Image: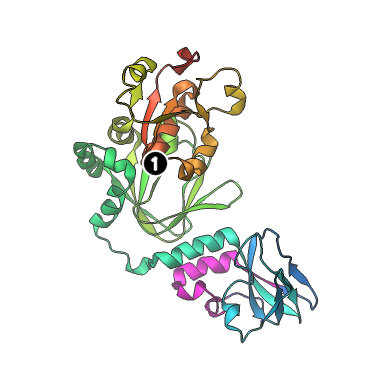
Amino acid sequence: MTNTINHDILRVFTPFDTLNPEYLDKVTEKASVREFPKGTMVFKRGKELEEAFYLIEGNVDLIDAQFVITSVDPKSEARRLPLSGSSPTQVSAMTKSPVKLLCVERDFLDLVMAWSESGEDPSSVSEDDNDWMSYLLQAPLFAKVPPGNIRQLFSRFTEQKVAADEIVVKEGERGELFYVLKTGSATVLDTTGKILAALRPGDYFGEEALVGDTTRNATVKMLTPGKLMCLQKEDFKALLHEPVTRFITAEELRERQKEFPPYQLLDVRLAVERRFQHVPGSRNIPLGSLRRTLAELDAQMTYIVTDDAGRRSDVAAQLLNQAGFDTYILKQANQHYGGL
């Protein structure tokens, strides 16, 4: 057997056996075949793994914490799954013969699992305009947009066809458009090419650069051919951003204390900026960390972002609104460092 990866090799393993050929082509670009001699420790128990390993040829012993050995060979049902399904690993892997392993980055494997479990076949995606609209309207952000604005939004979107592997937005470039994926699939990549997220019909992107009037903070690359619905920056701000952005002053907050819901003040500046002055009682979550922290926030809490971070405060409020949180921006926060 050669070290060339083809669809037949991939379909031996899960979840590749559930993918359509278009996605399998993407896997062949990312995966590699590696050979190990007999007696090699492929990985040790308790170690973080950046890759998942599948057995193509040979015999591997998996050794757990109690030194119980499970042997895996090409006839084993277990060889359909990665040798270690978790990271840190729960077992060590020792080769008992020369072996060939299929190696796939774990981040990429997570994306493949998402493709598999979505059950989406790009060749059968409906062209019905209502599909992407329906998905979009289910997003928490759109529940806050006035119905009249929704009608105007859909009338102002323009369609753009995109090819597989086409870069839609590039990190560092200025942003002028808001995008919704109508058909196809795409990935969000950081500067190193690491996959940050997978995008499917109804997912939107590009809003942060428009809200903060900054450059793109990530690259979006198409995986398959598809169609994008595009909205100009001015229309995005007027119809989608400004209507959901609410402001409050410290005085208004004091006057409404009795009827106002439980709230948390958020300071999204860097810790070094906050060190000199901040609104007492505020919680510091720098903007760069906020997206990763959203899942940990209390859905019953109202979040009030202090405006001392400038445009970063606007972006933070947008992220919170998109996630469905009740959100305000505290106006002139630098006048209230003495407390609310």
Q: Which residue is disc 1 drawn over? A: 299
Please report the bounds of the magenta region as a residue range.
6-34
Residue at the image point whose x is 61% and y is 63% from the top: 86
Q: Can residue 176 be spotted in the picture?
A: no
The quadrant where residue 128 appears:
bottom left
Q: Is residue 266 left or right of residue 232?
A: right
Q: How is the image coloured?
A: rainbow
The amino acid type of the residue labelled 1 equals Ala
Compared to residue 68, the image places residue 299 above or below, namely above
Q: Quadrant of the C terminus?
A: top left
Q: Is residue 73 left or right of residue 162?
A: right
Residue 336, percent across and down?
Answer: 46, 14
Q: Considering the numbered disc 1 on the image, is that residue within a helix, a strand or a loop?
A: loop
Q: Quadrant of the N terminus?
A: bottom right
Which residue is at the front of the view, 88 or 174? 88
Residue at the image point whose x is 34% and y is 30% from the top: 261
Residue 110, percent across and down?
Answer: 53, 61
Residue at the image point whose x is 66% and y is 66% from the top: 90
Residue 312 forms part of the magenta stretch: no
Q: Can residue 320 be spotted in the picture?
A: yes
Residue 27 forms part of the magenta stretch: yes
